[in-house]
Amino acid sequence: MIKTMACNGFLLFFFSVLVMQYFLLMATVQPTYAYNYCNYTANYSSNSAFPENLNTSFSYLYANAQSNGFYNTTAGESPDKVYILYLCRGDISPGLCQICLMEAREAITMICPNQEEAFIMYDECMLRYSNRSIFSVMEKSPDVCFFSHYSINTDPDQFSATLAGLMDDLVMKANSSSNLFATGDVNYTYYSKIYGLVQCTPDITPVDCSTCLHLSVEEMLHSFDGQRGGRVIRPSCNIRYEIYNFYNSRDATPAPSPPAASLPSPPVLPNIREKRRLSSKAIIAIHIIVPLVIVVVLLSSLCYPYRSWKAKKKHNARKKEIVGEHDITTSQSFEFYLTTIEAATKNFSAKNKIGEGGFGGVYKGTLSNGQEIAVKRLSRSRGQGVEEFKNEVLLLAKLQHKNLVRLLGFCLEGEEAILVYEFMHNKSLDHFLFDPVKQEELNWSRRYKIIRGIARGLLYLHEDSQLKIIHCDLKASNVLLDKDMNSKISDFGLARIFTVDQSLGCTSRIRGTYGYMSPEYAMHGQFSVKTDVFSFGILILEIISGKRNNFTFQSDYAENLLSYAWSQWKEGIPLELLDPTLADCYSRDEVDRCIHIALLCVQEDPDERPTMARVVLMLNTFNITLPRPRSPTFSLPRRTNQSTSKSTQWSVVTGSTNCDSNIIGFEKS
């Protein structure tokens, strides 16, 4: 015991000195992580020559990083041939370029350990490799758009127009440059400027560069909602703007740097401020200190008590069991300590509890830095929650969109399984929509904004994200509202991942919420993007009417929401569906169009329902003629003398599905 303590004490002192020297040096040179992509459909086998070829190609990059800001090369022969390239930002020094590549190489091999195609982006450089030729090819996807959480204070429309002009100028400037790179600024007010940067990989043509940059500018401006900073990242190009100077400029005085465009936490290595110039001595010092620190860490680990090793092994085994061997398990910055969450929620105080769902309890918390969070705690008595937990972590960690709730991290300690989200001040949509008092706060303008936000979120899931995702449980309680009443889709516990060319899936276990499920899913277990489209149509009708889908309308027949909406539309009086609390404060054209779109979404034949891309277009463009919807499938309840809402449910056949199994059950809303 004494020897162990002495060993620990000596090594701890030695290690502390080295680490202090290391981080004092590295604190000024560390590049800033931005984004990564791993192609999980392309994995190499254990006996493949691909990893050896990849390491060989990495060595080529280092040899050229001091003299070139862009370089591409190959290593090996097909089918294990590696195509690799790097691109450094056009305004940084060769020394920082090399350091960024060192960081990128270490990070990408840990984040994407077995993939034959991967891509990582830092503020200072980009590294990309594949088992297919990627040279001189303009590639637009995968793409991602980030924005700052902070908004500008005055005249966002003028800001947007000024930003558009700046970006157009920079695209032209980049296309006429030798390295397809440009930076610049423009006055927004007398005291304020907008700073911009655009860059393409120099292996593509100026015409392809212009196409890639214009697509990125268009996406940024389309998603712009008054944010102070933003960026779009694609394999062949990237753009960025801020209200402070974030690049090297001789004639610009750097302003104090507020938080930049909201980026995901780096999956492996921490973010530290960059140093603009790096001496060759510093590089040599790093190459000496890093291996030495690694040796000391390995030596010190031999002196750790057996109990600590066993506890860590048990924790990692449980993490692997629940989350699996995905890149999320390597992200220490994504994992919260239980003590941190207990402190934030006052040890899961009943006063901090804000909800209860199928997953478990939901608590409000406040971190030590003042950030408010929502904490979902897995109930130990609910077996299905483990699968939902796993699904949600693996999906939301890869999704970034302003109309999706943001997962901040997770915690797995002991028997606890916890998810940590950004806090939504206005809770869920149903909290307002179905409350006789609070629904008056939802004027038509807010409702229309919520509808369009949900549509954009679904479009991202179906077509624009890294993965093709079917939510499978879209409903009012799974749409959250932030402090500005912006809608964000949440709860991905039942979501399904499709491959790029997959259009239809089938399951023998029907799980979802009664009333929102499409007929083909409820009766046959078939699901597709059109399953979400159907749920979206029901949700539109609820938002317009302020009534739940099982509400019973007193007409010639006791009709539920869908059958009542269809009969009123067929009779030419669709506005009879409108929530009376809206009075005359609404746009007739917008309401008519939303009801029409909703009825198109709930048609019985999935092929006749529009895609979400078409829905977004129909919501934003009024000069498009909408087709006439066909009658949806619904069952009419018996006539009742009650005037209040009564459970009116879909007619569901319980029996064998097309998946050769039985329907197990439903989850009532």
Image (cartoon, rainbow, N blue to C red):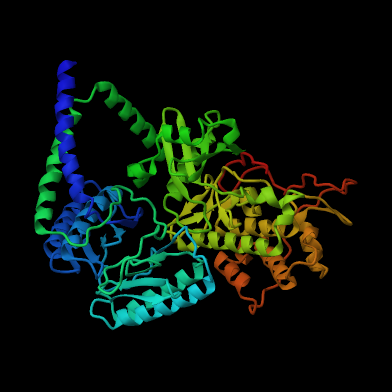
Q: Quadrant of the C terminus?
A: top right
| Residue 353 screen position, x and y as percent | 59, 36
Left/right of residue 537 with respect to residue 207 in the rendered view: right
Residue placed at 58% from the left, 49% from the top? 425
**Relative to 308, residue 115 above or below:** below
| Residue 574 screen position, x and y as percent | 79, 66
**Relative to 56, residue 360 above or below:** above
Q: Residue furthest front?
A: 191
Residue placed at 54% from the left, 59% from the top? 457
- Comparing 668 with 156, the one in front is 156
- Comparing 354 with 627, the one in front is 354
Q: Residue furthest top?
A: 1
Q: Is residue 577 visible?
A: yes
| Residue 486 screen position, x and y as percent | 58, 58
Q: How many marks?
A: 0
| Residue 298 screen position, x and y as percent | 17, 34
Location of residue 535 (image quadrant): bottom right
**Relative to 537, residue 159 above or below:** below
Left/right of residue 505 with respect to residue 433 in the rendered view: left
Q: Is residue 76 visible?
A: no
Left/right of residue 244 with respect to residue 390 in the rendered view: left
Q: Quadrant of the N terminus?
A: top left
- Comparing 597 with 396, the one in front is 396
Residue placed at 62% from the left, 65% from the top? 609
